[in-house]
Image (spheres, grey):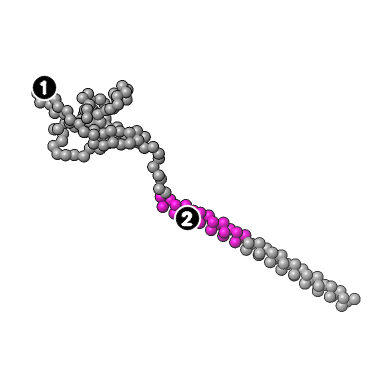
Amino acid sequence: MECYQIPVTYQTALSGGSPYYFAAELPPGNLPEPAPFTVGDNRTYQGFWNPPLAPRKGYNIYFQAMSSVEKETKTQCVRIATKAAATEEPEVIPDPAKQTDRVVKIAGISAGILVFILLLLVVILIVKKSKLAKKRKDAMGTTRQEMTHMVNA
């Protein structure tokens, strides 16, 4: 495995077409004990920006250590991860709470329409009943008048 000898920032890699960039430089004095490191955390380390990873892009992630004593520098690196490019959108799992809200809305609207129809039917029945009662009343009055005329005749 060949290590990357020249540190390249993300901005330089973008403008210069470099296939790699350094996401961080962590001097040993800043690491008194092991600490987690997140690739793509959008932070800057010793002048190297660790940009968020693009979901549709593939990455090979390397850990590289450099050791210098007097005029001699040794570099070791190892690929610690590979991130493949996402080819499609992740499957969206519907939120049960939103589905329940939708069902409640539909049920509420349906119930409202049903109540409206029932009220309309009740009003129609009342109007028809009152018209029928009025017709009967008018019919009774006419019949009495006819009987009166017959008796007097």
Quadrant assignment, res 71? top left
Answer few, some or many: residues within 10 Å of disc 1's Cα (few below 14, many 20 plus, some between 14 and 19): few
Residues packed near mark 2 inside 10 Å, few (<14), some (14 to 19) or many (20 plus)? few
Identify the disc placed on residue 104: 2
**Position of 65 relative to 101 (above/below):** above
Which residue occupies the extreme left position in the image?
A: 70
The part of the chain drawn in magenta is 95-120
| Magenta stretch contains residue 14 | no
Q: Quadrant of the image for the N terminus?
A: top left
Gap in Å between the C-alphas at discs 1 and 2?
Answer: 75 Å
For residue 75, what is the image quadrant? top left
Q: Is 150 in front, or is 14? A: 14
101 lies left or right of 21: right
Which residue does the image show at 75% across and 70% down from the upper left? 136
Q: Position of residue 3 (x, y in %)?
A: 21, 28
Q: Residue furthest right?
A: 153
Q: Is residue 104 magenta?
A: yes
Is label 1 or label 2 in front? 1
Tell me the tag on residue 62: none
* Residue 32 versus residue 116 in the image, above or below: above
The residue indicated by pointer 1 is 71
